[in-house]
Image (tube, rainbow, N blue to C red):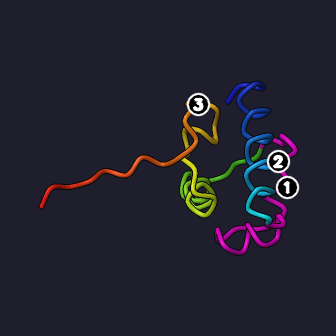
Amino acid sequence: MTEQEWRVLGERLRRVRRRHDLTSAQLAERAGTTRATISALENRRKLRVSFDVMARIAAVLGVSLDWLAGRKDEETVAVAVLAG
């Protein structure tokens, strides 16, 4: 990821976490990761984090992974509706 992408990810992660009134420890527990990982992401410290962890963080916050990573402007997760 580029510096810009890390910056956007950190800012968006912190903003939506606070909107949900969650501490970094609470988010970490719900997403199955550590508070240190959440803190590192929010503070733009580059670390190796699995796709699975990032997907769980996005799911807990109800946002798309593409939005969180700054690749899309649409915040919400698109839900496909299947015809019965």
The kind of residue tagged 2 is Glu
Quadrant for the C terminus, please.
Answer: bottom left
Q: Is residue 16 above or below residue 44?
A: below
Which residue is at the front of the view, 35 or 21? 21
Query: For the residues marked 3 and 1, what is the alpha-carbon distance in whole angstroms?
Result: 23 Å
Which label belongs to residue 39?
Answer: 1
Q: Are marks 2 and 1 in contact (CB under 8 Å)?
A: yes
In the shown orientation, is residue 69 left or right of residue 55? right
Secondary structure mostly seen in the magenta stretch: helix
> In the image, what residue occupies the spot 82% across and 64% down?
24
Which label belongs to residue 76?
Answer: none
Residue located beneath label 3 in the image = 73
Q: Position of residue 50 (x, y in %)?
A: 60, 53
Looking at the rendering, the stretch of residues picked out in magenta corresponds to 22-46
Write down the quadrant of residue 30 in the picture. bottom right
How many marks the image carries: the answer is: 3
Quadrant for the N terminus, please.
Answer: top right
Query: For the residues marked 2 and 1, what is the alpha-carbon distance in whole angstroms?
Result: 5 Å
> In the image, what residue occupies the spot 72% across and 75% down?
29
Residue located beneath label 2 in the image = 42
Write down the quadrant of residue 45 in the picture. top right
